[in-house]
Image: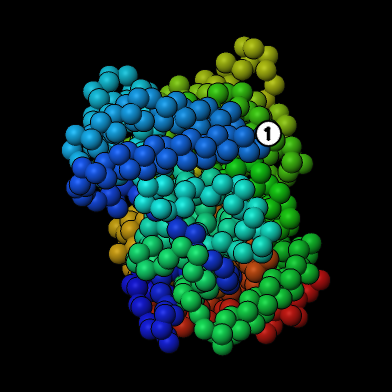
């Protein structure tokens, strides 16, 4: 895998692109480009006699967008959140407003310019007016103006607009699989793709553990990031092959390549089916050690996939996605319903719910990551919650209320100092007191855990383990902060290595500290789902893993072939090394190769 793009010429017009595979599997389908239309607007002048035609072209585009928005509104699922409907209505209102639907016509007339340029000029003007507004909520509505104008410009440029459910259905009816091709997709956009049936997902930018990549993985389809020029080089509708494991995209493949990949696709699917045989097998090592395999989820509906994968609990519920793509914070009642639904669906199995981890690449609607110089080092996660005690209080009350309906445990993200933990405990106590006063039932002994994802917390893990009920190692951030590598930046993606000796040492330190104090510890970052690393983590003493449901069976396969007493010895040898290049080959010795997979115990 490489972070750089290589374009290899095949017999024209076929070519391949190389990026970073973030979700395995092979997809063959047609490209669906998501464009950033605003970047493509050019300015040109028109002769007087073409002006009325240009105005008509603009009016037609506005009418098309109106029709599309109305159609999307009508086809919304009955159970779609009310905010989505309100959001579409706002866009319709903005589109109908004279400032967007009429003023650009005057600009075309006056400036003798093209329609795209006219509406872009008008948008800049309107956005500037919004920026003067003091009220935060209204000021943020400038994003809606931008989105509406983008839609109009896309139509003017002849790009297909947002995929309507009608288009999707017809693509599916024709068995035409669609592959999403984008320059970049925010986590907020990616979560919306969960409703769509794309066959694969590829982007120009993004790191392997960026939240966009994590969401792509949760869609359970092949995904590649860091392709650099895919959005420019691939055209809408072109046939493409996506090999998520190798990080390769082949555009317009010739017949022989297509046949070869169809074969590989069948093999992959066969392998996945074989793994299904161990779905209900207990995750026990050859020497009888019981291992917990939990699932990571982003929205309550993910519980279905978690249960289908044979997970015996939820090890990480990232609640921040409930707060994104909307105008207002979710109420206590809405949060309570979401958390309770997960607790009930898991029927008494553990459900570890992480408190809000907003900030860095996960932003609320309308807020931009670039507003602070180093967002990953800024007001993120628990720091944000402690600075917004009312938001935190509401979430804690909702979590406590839901704890009466299952085995909910609370997990605090990004702890760096004990003072943050103590402040969080005070606020938890305050939320408990408020519920007691109302006689609202909750679990008085609810477990409180902390994420170890900052080197300072790993080095000080024993102190955290002393004051907490359990620990969860967030390797995605732990790697980012230990190696000073922005996990969303593809230009440094090649340096992002979970096997860096410093990272391994911090993980080992944390596991040892928790084990010494008899406190449960898990890994819930992407490392937990890497079957190649399972035996190393077992050797370090890890007995609890939490990962995306699609990885559970391949990790379980490794566990079934493990002997933990031997692995401890191997892990010790690896931890003594200070050179990644020596670590990688040793790791291969641990791995149970594919051929042995068929001999799984049942
Ligand atoms: C992590 O950092 O490893 C983690 C699990 O949290 P997130 O990926 O949501 O930051
Ligand atoms: Mg994290």
Characterize the local packing of mark 1: few (<14), some (14-19) or many (20 or more) Cα atoms within 10 angstroms: few
Residue name at image x 74 percent, y 71 percent? 273
Q: Position of residue 214 (x, y in %)?
A: 50, 55
Q: Position of residue 585 (x, y in %)?
A: 46, 83
With respect to residue 573, does 289 lie above or below? above
Residue at (42% x, 40% y) in the render: 60
Q: Give whichever of 156, 515 is nearer the camera.
A: 156
Q: Is residue 251 left or right of residue 127?
A: right
Quarter of the figure with residue 93: top left
Q: Quadrant of residue 385?
A: top left
Which residue, given by chain and number where applicable, does mark 1 sit on? Answer: 78
The answer to whether residue 506 is visible is no
Residue at coordinates 41% horizontally, 83% vertically from top-left? 12
Compared to residue 112, the image places residue 87 above or below, namely above
Residue 155: percent from the left, percent from the top?
A: 41, 47
Left/right of residue 111 with respect to residue 282 in the rendered view: left
Extreme-top residue of the structure: 437
User: Is 22 in front, or is 80?
Assistant: 80
Residue 236 seen from this side: yes
From this viewpoint, which residue is outermost toward the right? 602
């Amino acid at each position: 895998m490489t972070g750089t793009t290589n374009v290899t010429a095949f017999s024209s017009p076929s070519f391949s692109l190389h990026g970073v595979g973030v979700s395995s599997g092979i997809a063959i389908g047609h490209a669906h480009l998501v464009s950033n239309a605003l970047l493509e607007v050019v300015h040109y002048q028109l002769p007087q006699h073409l002006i009325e035609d240009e105005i008509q072209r603009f009016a037609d585009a506005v009418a098309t967008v109106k029709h599309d928005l109305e159609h999307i509104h009508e086809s919304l699922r009955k159970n779609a959140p009310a905010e989505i409907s309100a959001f579409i209505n706002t866009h319709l209102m903005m589109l109908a407003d004279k400032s967007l639907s009429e003023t650009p016509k005057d600009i075309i007339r006056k400036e003798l310019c093209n329609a795209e340029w006219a509406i872009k000029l008008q948008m800049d003007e309107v956005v500037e007016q919004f920026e003067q507004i003091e009220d935060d909520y209204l000021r943020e509505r400038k994003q809606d103006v931008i989105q509406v104008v983008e839609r109009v410009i896309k139509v003017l440029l002849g790009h297909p607009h947002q995929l309507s459910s009608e288009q999707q259905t017809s693509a599916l009816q024709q068995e035409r699989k669609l592959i999403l091709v984008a320059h970049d997709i925010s986590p907020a956009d990616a979560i919306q793709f969960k409703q769509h049936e794309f066959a694969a997902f590829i982007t120009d930018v993004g790191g392997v553990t960026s939240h966009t990549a994590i969401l792509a993985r949760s869609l359970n389809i092949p995904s590649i990031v860091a392709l650099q020029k895919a959005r420019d080089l691939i055209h809408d509708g072109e046939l493409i092959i996506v090999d998520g494991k190798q990080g390769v995209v082949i555009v317009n493949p010739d017949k022989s390549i297509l046949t070869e990949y169809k074969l590989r696709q069948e093999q992959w699917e066969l392998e996945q089916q074989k793994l299904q045989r161990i779905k209900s097998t207990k995750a026990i090592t050859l020497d009888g050690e019981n291992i917990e395999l939990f699932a990571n989820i982003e929205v309550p509906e993910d519980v279905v996939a978690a249960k289908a994968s044979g997970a015996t609990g939820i090890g990480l519920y990232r609640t921040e996605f409930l707060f994104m793509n909307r105008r207002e914070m979710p109420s206590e009642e809405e949060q309570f319903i979401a958390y309770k639904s997960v607790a009930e669906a898991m029927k008494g199995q553990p459900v570890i719910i992480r408190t809000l981890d907003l900030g860095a690449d996960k932003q609320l609607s309308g807020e931009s990551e670039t507003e602070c110089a180093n967002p990953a080092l800024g007001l993120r996660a628990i720091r944000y919650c402690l600075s917004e005690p009312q938001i935190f209080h509401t979430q804690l009350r909702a979590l406590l209320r839901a704890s009466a309906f299952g085995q909910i445990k609370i997990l605090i993200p990004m702890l760096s100092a004990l003072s943050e933990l103590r402040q969080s405990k005070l606020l938890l106590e305050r939320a408990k007191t408020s519920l007691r006063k109302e006689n609202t039932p909750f679990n008085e002994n609810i477990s409180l855990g902390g994420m170890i994802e900052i080197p300072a917390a790993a080095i000080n893990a024993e102190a955290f383990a002393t004051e907490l009920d359990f620990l969860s190692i967030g390797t995605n951030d732990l790697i980012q902060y230990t190696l000073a590598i922005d996990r969303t930046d593809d230009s440094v993606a090649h340096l992002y290595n979970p096997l860096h000796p410093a990272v391994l040492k911090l993980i080992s330190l944390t596991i040892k500290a928790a084990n010494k104090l008899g406190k449960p510890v898990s890994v819930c970052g992407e490392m937990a789902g890497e079957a190649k690393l399972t035996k190393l983590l077992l050797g370090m003493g890890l007995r609890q893993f939490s990962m995306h449901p699609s990885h559970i069976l391949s990790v379980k396969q490794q566990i079934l072939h493990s002997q933990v007493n031997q692995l401890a010895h191997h892990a010790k040898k690896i931890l003594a090394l200070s050179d990644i290049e020596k670590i990688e080959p040793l790791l291969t010795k641990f791995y149970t190769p594919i051929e042995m997979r068929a001999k799984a115990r049942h």
